[in-house]
Image (spheres, rainbow, N blue to C red):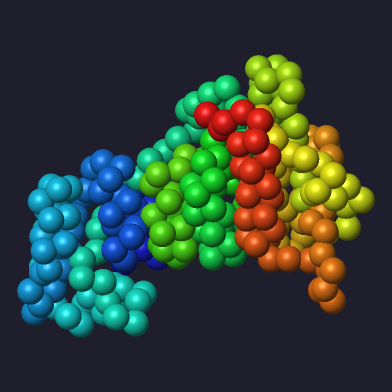
Amino acid sequence: MLAVKNNRRKRSERGEVFVEGVAAIDALAGAGLPVVCVAYSAERSLSRWAEGIIERVRPERELIVTDELMRRLSDRTDPSEIIVIANRPSPSLDDFSPGASPFFIVFDRPSNHGNLGSVIRTSDAFRSSGVVTTGHGVDPYDPAVIRASLGAIFTSPVVHEPSAARIEDWIGSLRAAYPGLSVVGTDSSASVSLDDAALVAPVVVFLGNEAKGLSERLRGLVDTMVSIPMSGVVNSLNVACAASIVMYEIARNTRSGKKLS
């Protein structure tokens, strides 16, 4: 379990994911992913919720451990009642089903687990078509990302595509399929205001790395760079906050015209 929790390479090789926390486990169970193992303490009685989860997911095996080991396994101050190891989804760009009005988020080299998890959570909230991560960044299936997403990673399509060339091809295919597609990037110094951009699906939004911004290669795919109008002393927002504002604006504008698919 510790190998799956702490080692990205092991997670990838085994095709498994480490999940703790009520919201994340509920989302995992709802997604119907095969569960390899459920661990719980021999020193505590399971709640009706935990018993129901075990009955629902029907794990290949149950691992009964000590309270001490549960504390070692858990990253929570109050250790999770149960911890789950499950087979993780492995979608590709070709697996997306964007429907009539695609609304994608592309996050370039995310470096913060909480930011990526928050972007995935917001993507689910505003019914985007999916999130794509690119380049060398944090693992979308790191337990910290899963916790920050509240399990939305299991309900909203998330694809990691390390190849910028593949992203270019994918954007090209979207442009061919959706002639009205807008491809936009976010930058606090951009001259086009989010208010004036009036973004609506079909749209792809590129988010840059927290420290370095959007790579030049990906910036070259963008039609328009937009900024969020602000009147305070600070001149930029955390990327997850900025993404939430942009996604809300797209969802609102799209609802006023045609509904998201």
Q: Is residue 66 visible?
A: yes
Q: Residue at x 30, y 50 (%)?
A: 28
Residue 260, horizontal then vertical, whole percent: 56, 32
Picture residue at 58% right of the left edge, 62% below the top: 115
Instruction: Judge whether residue 108 can be spotted in this image.
Output: no
Can you say whether 1 is above or below 201 in the image?
below
Taking depth in this image into account, of 198 and 160 the one nearest to the observer is 198
Q: How many labels, in total?
A: 0
Q: Residue at x 16, y 62 (%)?
A: 49
Q: Is 51 placed left or right of 2 in the picture?
A: left
Based on the displayed image, in which of its 4 quarters is residue 6 positioned?
A: bottom left
Q: Residue furthest right?
A: 191
| Residue for point 81% across, 48% down | 195
Name above or below for residue 28 compared with residue 166: below
Farthest-out residue, front: 256
Q: Nearer the viewer, residue 175 or 250?
A: 250
Measuring from the top left, give residue 135's x and y in whole percent: 64, 47
The image quadrant where one finds the N terminus is bottom left
The location of residue 209, given as percent across then percent down, is 70, 57
Q: Is residue 158 left or right of residue 73?
A: right
| Residue 244 falls in image quadrant | bottom right
Q: Position of residue 60 (x, y in %)?
A: 13, 48
| Side (left or right) of 149 relative to 53 | right
From what the image shows, is residue 210 above or below residue 45? above
